[in-house]
Amino acid sequence: MQRILVVDDAEINRELLRKILEDDYIVETAAGGEQALHRLQREHAGMSALLLDLHMPGTDGFAVITEMKERDWISRVPVLIISSEHSVEAENKCLEMGVSDFIHKPFESSVVKNRVKNAIELFAYKRQLEQKVEEQAEALKKQSQIIQMQAERLSKAKPFNRLMMEYRSVIMEVETKLKVLNAVFSEEYKRNPFESIKSRLKTPDSIYKKLEKKGYSFTIENIQKYVADVAGVRVICSFPDDIYRLAELLTKQDDIILLKKKDYIETPKSNGYRSLHLILSVPIFLADEKKYVKVEVQFRTIAMDFWASLEHKLKYKKDIDNTDEIELRLKACADSIEALDYQMQEIRDRIDRPGDYSPLHEQEGSAGSFHAKE
């Protein structure tokens, strides 16, 4: 049978609770807070619940709860307050300190039994969940260590290093093509289609995790076949129509193959994210061969790039409160950014002299009409 400790300075209350609970539990009693703490010091691991009076001479119920919190006993033993007081302030204070429930005097036998039973069961269930979470966290930690070890081992292999060299090369090829287009625009239209270019190469452990998520083993062949964004280039543009014009001119080049397009500007993600994503196959020229390599190219406006950096922090930081509220505010900001981008684009069009640089949507009907060979 489970053991319960009843703490009350009034003997009649201790005996009444013993009588109510003795058929289902081993009921022990203490006449005050000091005596209760001595019992808990020796036996807290074996206690299933503590029924505690708040108002006692000497060490009262609040002092007992405070000591239990300091010693972390309250995370192991559910505490039910027994009191004739119905003060909302007192109850809130107790709940904030970690108390599980209340049993009010005068005692009703069925209520006492049910509250004690529920508190014990809920507490046990909570402990089981916490233990499972700890076990899963430990398993994930071990899995992450295994992934890191395997990724590090592969990263030292010659075929993997050769593959990463090819992905670095395709990034340089795309950057060169974009810089040439930028120079052409600067000469012909006296303006630049993009503000900056950023590039990145996925780390070995990031590649490993992506393949594992898709259900494939970590091999050179699977990386080439199933991971399209090992090499990534991000192009930051001033205006939305610059994005579509630049993407079209890039993919019209006869040595580039468009494999896939995701237009999150025309159809934004649910969180408000807007960007144009292209998966391209681009040739690189090695010492002994010409080889096509996949690269992901993302196009964003300046404002959306700033937004995306904030959203990324929210996604990967684990210790942030009120994430739902932040997500709603970010979504509202994304909608405002879209409106602002197009307003600024319209102002630019009115400033530009006729014939200088006409927006793509005026030439082809819509900024979203971008097509390229696949």
Image (cartoon, rainbow, N blue to C red):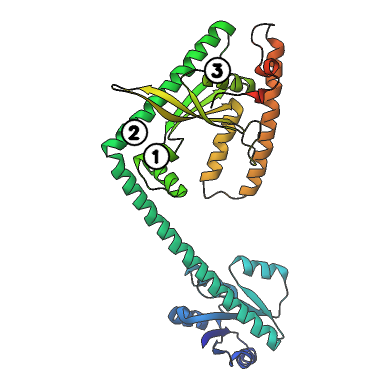
The reply to whether residue 53 is in sight is no
**Crowd tier of the residue under label 1, counting other residues whose Cα lies within 10 Å: few below 14, some 14–19, many 20 or above:** many
Image x and y of residue 241, in percent:
64, 20
Residue 135 figure quarter? bottom left
Residue 223, which numbered label?
A: 1
- Residue 266 vertical placement versus 355 (above, below): below
Instruction: Report the residue marked by disc 2.
Output: 163
Report the front residue among 124 and 193: 193
Residue 339 figure quarter? top right
Query: Is label 3 in contact with label 2 (beta carbons under 8 Å)?
Result: no
- Residue 18 vertical placement versus 33 (above, below): below
How many dots with numbers?
3
Instruction: Report the residue marked by disc 3.
Output: 249
Query: Is label 2 in contact with label 1 (beta carbons under 8 Å)?
Result: yes
Image x and y of residue 294, in percent:
44, 30
- Residue extending furthest toward the front: 374
Residue at 57%, 85% in the rendered image: 6
Report the front residue among 338 and 213: 213
Residue at 48%, 28% in the rendered image: 280
Residue at 57%, 23% in the rendered image: 372
The reply to whether residue 345 is in sight is yes
